[in-house]
Image: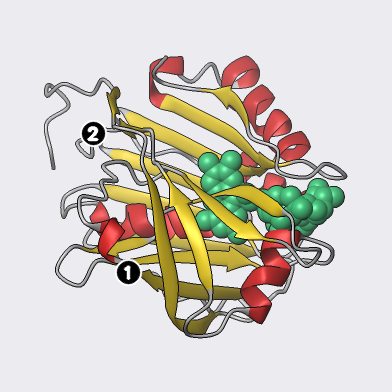
Amino acid sequence: MIEATQDLASRRVRHEAVRRPVTVVGVEPVGANSLSVTFEGAALAGFTSLGFDDHCKFIFEDAGGEEAKRDFTPRRFDPHRNWLTLEFALHEGGAASEWAERALPGSAATIGGPKSSVVVPTGYAWHLLAGDPTAAPAIARRLEELPEGTRAIAILLDPAGSGDRLLSSRAEMDVRWTKEEGAFVKEIRSIKLPEGPGFVWCAGEAGLMAQLRNLFVTERQHPRSALRIAGYWKLGSAGVHETIESSVA
Ligand SMILES: Cc1cc2nc3c(=O)[nH]c(=O)nc-3n(C[C@H](O)[C@H](O)[C@H](O)COP(=O)(O)OP(=O)(O)OC[C@H]3O[C@@H](n4cnc5c(N)ncnc54)[C@H](O)[C@@H]3O)c2cc1C
């Protein structure tokens, strides 16, 4: 087991703001209701994403020909080929979601940022990762980055009900899939958290995340230095990002 004596403080690292023109090299399904889109471009040289929950601006032409911007998690970056992969959770009436469904090799877009990364140490005794399909790319990335000797509990809300996203980790992993919000919150409430210092990370629809904030901050009094909760979208509003709790300013 990793000792809890190492520095467990999160830190923010700032990056130069760069806009990078890219084109699609491949589109693949991830589970039943998401698409993995891989982009290439010489401008991706030097792309830096140090934190699993970083976001870049995906800048694209919407169906009406207007420029639109939405936040997406850098799921994977291959610095040898300058290939960046984003994963799009598909939903009705979303400009970015519709763009991903239309994307073909050669489709053009622009990637902005990440402007900064929050680095959360992996040396906690356990990590709780909870979220909906928009959080699944960050959760999958974190699970891949966690080392042996720590524990990861991942609770995913997957309304498509497929639960067939492949997740891998060197950490001891406990993955639970739920199909609707009530069951998702109930599952999180029911968890007996392991001993030792742990980090809680949650992202998804803003109203749902506000409920999780109440659970961890008000009810459980989890240390706020070991908590990050974010609204990745808001029912009825386009392109919303709300930081609800953050372990770092
Ligand atoms: C830091 C950060 C990282 C993110 N990473 C990812 C990621 O890796 N993958 C990903 O898919 N999303 C991610 N998101 C969420 C994504 O930015 C939003 O879902 C965004 O609104 C999608 O844009 P859109 O153009 O498809 O829909 P919009 O045009 O923004 O929204 C249209 C309508 O759809 C609703 N809506 C938006 N998103 C969803 C959804 N997922 N399900 C159901 N209804 C929705 C809106 O409330 C609105 O009513 C992230 C958000 C943040 C803040």
Residue nearer the viewer, 25 or 220: 25
Dot 1 corresponds to which residue?
A: 168
Query: Can I make out residue 198 in this image?
Result: yes
Query: Which quadrant of the rendered structure holds the C terminus?
Result: top left
Dot 2 corresponds to which residue?
A: 121
- Tag 1's secondary structure? loop
In the picture as drawn, the residue positioned furthest to the right comes out as 236
Nearer-N-terminus badge (2/1): 2
Residue 229 is left or right of residue 126, and the answer is right
**Quick check: 81 above or below 170?**
below
- Which residue type carries mark 2? Pro
In the picture as drawn, the residue positioned furthest to the front comes out as 65
Crowding at dot 2, Cα within 10 Å, few <14 / some 14-19 / many 20+, comes out as some
- Which residue type carries mark 1? Ser
Residue name at image x 35 percent, y 51 percent: 152
- Tag 2's secondary structure? loop
Residue nearer the viewer, 178 or 111: 111
**Quick check: 181 above or below 179?**
above
Where's residue 41, x and y in %? 32, 67
Q: CA distance from mark 2 to mark 1?
A: 19 Å
Where's residue 149, x and y in %? 16, 50
**Quick check: 109 above or below 207?**
below
Residue name at image x 77 percent, y 60 percent: 94
Examine the image and state in which quarter residue 7 appears.
top left
Query: Can I make out residue 184 in this image?
Result: no
Where's residue 67, x and y in %? 67, 52
Residue 235 is left or right of residue 226, and the answer is right
Crowding at dot 1, Cα within 10 Å, few <14 / some 14-19 / many 20+, comes out as some
